[in-house]
Image (cartoon, grey):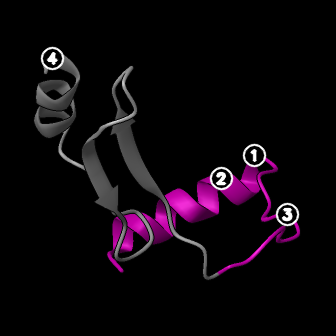
């Protein structure tokens, strides 16, 4: 963690932002599935860790197919 992150966290706390209670499973990760009108999966992405996201270009290419 960088010193900048510490300052940003302190600033957020000063503004009243607080971590709320956890809802659902803390182990659940996200993902993206692109399915066409015939039901064929055109793109599948499964997050391996929190904050893991697919590349936007990959998503756009899947949507263009």
- Give the CA separation, mark 1 to mark 2: 5 Å
Dot 4 or dot 3: first in sequence order is 3
**From this viewpoint, which residue is outermost toward the right?**
21
Q: Label 3: which residue?
A: 20
- Give the CA separation, mark 1 to mark 3: 15 Å
Q: Label 1: which residue?
A: 15
- Determine whether 43 is above or below 24 in the image: above
Crowd rating for badge 2 (residues with CA inside 10 Å; few <14, some 14–19, many 20+): few
Disc 3 secondary structure class: loop
Disc 4 secondary structure class: helix
Residue at 36 percent across and 80 percent down: it is 1
Numbered tag placed on residue 64 in the rendering: 4
Range of magenta residues: 1-26
Q: Nearer the viewer, mark 4 or mark 3?
A: 4
- Give the CA separation, mark 4 to mark 3: 39 Å
Residue at 80 percent across and 60 percent down: it is 18
Q: Nearer the viewer, mark 1 or mark 3?
A: 3
- Determine whether 34 is above or below 21 in the image: above
Q: Label 2: which residue?
A: 12
Mark 1 and mark 2 in contact? Answer it, CB < 8 Å.
yes
Q: Nearer the viewer, mark 2 or mark 3?
A: 3
Q: Position of residue 13 (x, y in %)?
A: 72, 59
Q: Nearer the viewer, mark 4 or mark 1?
A: 4
- In the picture, the quarter occupied by the C terminus is top left
Answer whether residue 53 is visible to the viewer in this image: no
């Amino acid at each position: 963690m960088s010193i900048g992150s510490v300052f940003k966290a302190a600033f957020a706390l000063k503004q009243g932002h607080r971590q709320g209670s956890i809802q659902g499973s803390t182990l659940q990760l996200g993902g993206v599935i692109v399915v066409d009108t015939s039901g064929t999966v055109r793109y599948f992405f499964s997050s391996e860790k929190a904050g893991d996201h697919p590349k936007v270009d990959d998503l756009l290419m899947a949507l263009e197919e």
